[in-house]
Amino acid sequence: MSNTAPRWLADLERLLAIRSQYVISGNIRDSFLVPQPGGPVLLPLLRALWETLKAQGYRCLLVYDPVDGLRVYPNEAEPKALAERLFELKLANGSQQISLETLNNVMRNLSAQREARCALLVDFASRLTRQADHLSEAEHRFFIAAEKLSLNASALVPKDGGIPLFNPILWLVNRPQDLPSWFALDSERVASLIVSRPDYETREAAAHQLAALFDGHSDASEAARAKFIKNFTDGTEGMTLNALSDITELASREHLGIDAIDDAVRCYKVGALDNPWRKDYLRAKIRDAQSFIEDRVKGQRCAVVKTLDILKRSTMGLTGAQARSGSGRPRGVLFFAGPTGVGKTELAKTLTQLVFGNERAYIRFDMSEFAEEHSSARLLGAPPGYIGFDAGGELTNAVREKPFSVVLFDEIEKAHPRILDKFLQILEDGRLTDGRGDTAYFSETILIFTSNLGIYVEDEQGRRSQNVRPGDAYDIVESRVREAIGDYFKFRLSRPEILNRIGDNIVVFDFISPEVAERIFDGMLKNVARRLFEEFHLQLAMPAEIRSDLLARCTRDLSNGGRGIGNALESNFINPLSRALFAQEIEGKRRIVVTALAEEDKVISLTLQVD
């Protein structure tokens, strides 16, 4: 368990002898594990800062912010009396409202102070000005004076002959650019301290601190406690220590003990305690799902089996189990590749229906709409400070709204390569932060990418040629498509790391065979008949020879898969059927029979018998 101070505090302690001012940014609103005689303790930034300064002989800490003005920390009689005397303060109700000019005088007094070691923290320094690059005259004068102080200040030599230390001024900002860019530029006396998010060891130490607050901790075995620490630490990757404290509070309110730490972390991330992935009925549905899927996605047995294997792994929570920490990754990742119209999108819908009971519950993005680099702002949110950054991104907003979902990225190869880079973070860490600073967690989603890569390739002259054809053996189709996908990511995009994150989750679909095409055709014809009955209460019938003629017309070219069959059925049957129905009086009729199918001058017509 860690017993060392956070790095930014250690850097501050080391630099107090040579730097007079500090710009502190990053994870400044978090809590911090600070070593104490009885062991490390979780403290807010102000308390952690004071404990560090006090250990170096500082006797008071002045704190200023634009709302409450100036106050003394800690709020105790001795440091307050010292501050009022040294800085001529009148702290009514513990604080004093002052102007920037008065604050500048306090800063000057602090830097020149020789009686006692004191420090000044300017909190919410990002809000001192409306625009850091467009200062008013008073604001400009204030920062010039602060810059001069940083250069002219001298260290305080203690009476006991210890190490000379500066009386520091500390600026607490959200981002360094919230202060004028010239303020700390090339200044040897202004240090920049970045407060990072807690690493694994720090979160592990915090988990030890918080463990006793969980129900059942005192009665748990050593093995159960060790498992709790590991799951708590793994599940909070990228989170603050404040988040760990909030999870602990949430667990207490929901009566979740140490054995339910995964539920507590998930509830904090996605706002839902109920977990569809752990429902017994889901396992039963997936166990018997192959026939259900193959009824909707015809002729793709290999793709269906591999997809179900990945789905079963996701349901068991074993995705990324080989890694030290994989709990934050998406539940499953699938890369559907193959010819157009063979069932890639249909399989995504079917999986959504299977897991969530509604095929419309999936989130779909057509990646051809994100072919330009700037379109990433629409998908992921504009960077902070840019127009629209406060609206978030379409992807991050959708996942926050529906954390348990299938997210489909159609035709991923059409997206701009810079956008693809964002998927690295999602695939590895399972989270994405938008321009507002809000984090969307993908840990409960299934990500599906679809692609037509590998069906056509470019030769050395840049001409497109067909790489695989209908009638090729599935083994040939799979190997050539996989090879083309590898070449695309490794050599064309020079981003093999994306392919590495996808791993062996590439599912290659086969071409539609004539036998499968006939089954798809019959299914579409049944859909037409069903629609006729729903709209007009008409039953559709046709002789076998007309059905055979129509089948031959619709399955003549299978290069466009099931979608091509549907388009051909629309042209060869649905359009002439609609024309024929318009010419008939169908009110009160019960049945229509297609008695003839004819083509003249490339116009197809039907003859109907209406009963």
Image (spheres, rainbow, N blue to C red):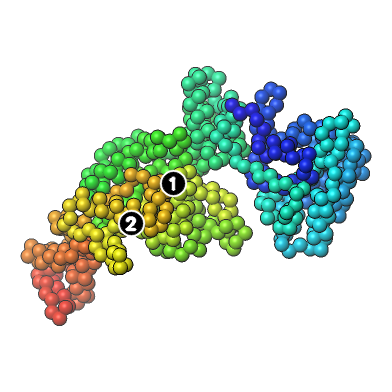
- SS state under label 2: strand
**Label for residue 451?**
2
The answer to whether 137 is drawn above or below residue 582 in the figure is: above
Q: Quadrant of residue 241?
A: top right
**Label for residue 604?**
none
Q: Amino acid at mark 1?
A: Leu
What percent of the width, then of the height, locates residue 606?
A: 14, 73
- SS state under label 1: helix
Q: Amino acid at mark 2?
A: Ser
* Neighbourhood count class around disc 2 (C-alpha, 10 Å): few under 14, some 14–19, many 20 upward: many
At 68% from the left and 28% from the top, the residue drawn is: 35
At 78% from the left and 51% from the top, the residue drawn is: 66
Left or right of 126, for residue 531: left
At 80% from the left and 35% from the top, the residue drawn is: 74
The answer to whether 114 is drawn above or below residue 435 in the figure is: above
**Disc 1 versus disc 2: distance between alpha carbons?**
17 Å
At 21% from the left and 71% from the top, the residue drawn is: 571
Question: 375 and 91: which one is in front?
Answer: 375
Q: Residue furthest bottom?
A: 601
Q: Quadrant of the N terminus?
A: top right
Query: Which residue corresponds to mark 1?
Result: 427
Q: Residue furthest left?
A: 545
What percent of the width, then of the height, locates residue 519?
A: 16, 55
* Neighbourhood count class around disc 1 (C-alpha, 10 Å): few under 14, some 14–19, many 20 upward: many
Left or right of 445, for residue 78: right
Q: Residue furthest front?
A: 460
Q: Quadrant of residue 252?
A: top right
